[in-house]
Image: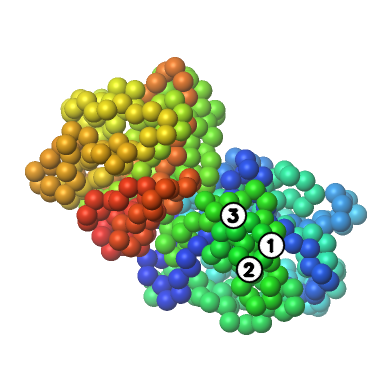
Amino acid sequence: MVSILGANSASSVSYEISNSLRFNQGDSPVLSKTPSSSGNQKTMTFSFWIKRSHLSDEFYFFYSAGQDANNRDGIRFYNNSLDLIIQRNDYDYYRLLTTAKFRDVSAWYHIVIAIDTTDSTSSNRFKMYVNGSQITDFQTETYPTQNLDLYFNENSAQYIGRFFSSDSNHYDGYIAEWNFIDGSQKAPTDFGKFNDNNVWIPKKYSGSYGTNGFFLEFKQTGTSQNASGIGADTSGNDNHFAVTNLAATDVTTDTCTNNFCTLNPLSAGSDIRANGSFLEGNTELINGGTSGQSSNQRCQGTMGFTNGKWYWEAKLVSNTMTVGIIDSDVQTSGSVNFSGLNTARYDSETGNVTNSGGTVYTGSTYDNGDIIGIAVDADNGYVYFAKNGTYQNSGDPTSGSSGTGGASITLGNFILPLISDNSSGSAGRHQHNFGNPPYAVSSSNTDGKYGNFEYAPPSGYYALCTKNLAEFG
């Protein structure tokens, strides 16, 4: 069973989306294209899936185009509300800004922006849908004049992932299944449907794309503006996007049809939130100021379980790290003292593996570049730790009820991945691979179905993703 399962994280769907593209704001990532000629600037549809990472920025863009600072169009989040903004002559604003806030970092959202400025009814000129439902409640609701030409689909630069005129306001998170339809105002049912459980799931778009339309599946890993590039258009139009500050490691299998665990900034201690940084789609953490370690600052993963066998990896980039598991009912957003809590953790500085009763054994210390494997047997109540593929304390994750070399835990509550840093002398930086690594692995290993790990998961252990949780959790 999953403790935090993002909306639209369907475990079984008829149409599978295999890839997404991870945007790390600090890298200034962007996809860009200038159409050879303008398409229909009055009628068009955007459809894409997103999974957010940053929530603290005032605004950042999914898509933008424009002529100058006073004449620009964009689709963005503004203070966590979805915002379609059309600006003309510095003061003419046409805008839909939702009342609803979208702050779930574990969820995939499907967004459709359907535009037809030729419609005689003003409220039909802009339509906004999230997860199949039309948004009708807005903070700001101003529709354009009839027959207004937008900068979207003009033969000027079009950007995915940033504000059009600068390297600021970049999107941070994941994007999948981007459809752009030139010349038609489509309904969300052209791109998705509700399943038998009333969950909105994707379906393959089968209509025309129009001349400037495109379909980005993010199945390629090249950096050129062609069919082998990350920005390859697979609609048949060959409207490929140029790639800036994105790499092969940014192409992931974390999608709306198989959602992977990441770090959860909402669970982090106050010092981490104030001074730390969550990077690479919440798979990397810079722990923050040294006061955070002395104040018992922690962070959890977005997905948990009560049973099954699960595997993930953590790579120490610099300084110190402690990894393991903890009960989900422990609130890590404040200071947490581990004493007596149901937890198992492995510390880089001491090598100590500790549970609720204290130190279970002392394994090897680990340092920058080392990869720690975490194997959790939630059927028998043991956690095993490996350093660079070697299990500590002669641990055997396949030993079942004997728990050979494992640290025992109490079963019953949801169990979540735990990330912390016990050193008070330096802030740790580390990367966490739940099957969607933020770094290049030298020898790719799956769990037999999913994931991409440096070391092979033990037999019968699985990556933390919604398909596995539905089948084995």
Whole-number angstrom distance, CA of label 2 to CA of label 3: 38 Å
| Residue 100, label in figure | 3
Reading the image, the residue beneath label 1 is 225
Closer to the camera: disc 2 or disc 3?
2
Q: Is residue 165 left or right of residue 254?
A: right
158 vs 57, nearest the viewer? 158
How crowded pointer 2 is (Cα within 10 Å; few <14, some 14-19, many 20+) is rated as some
Dot 1 amino acid type: Gln
Residue 82 in the image: state x and y as whole percent. 64, 55
Reading the image, the residue beneath label 2 is 227
Q: Is residue 295 left or right of residue 412?
A: right
212 vs 72, nearest the viewer? 212
Dot 2 amino acid type: Ala
Which quarter of the picture shows residue 100? bottom right
Q: Can you name the residue that lies furthest to the top here? A: 425
User: Sequence order check: which comes first, mark 1 or mark 3?
Assistant: 3
Q: Is residue 110 left or right of residue 69?
A: left
| Disc 1 + disc 3, Cβ < 8 Å | no
Q: Which residue is depicted at the point 23% across and 39% down?
A: 391
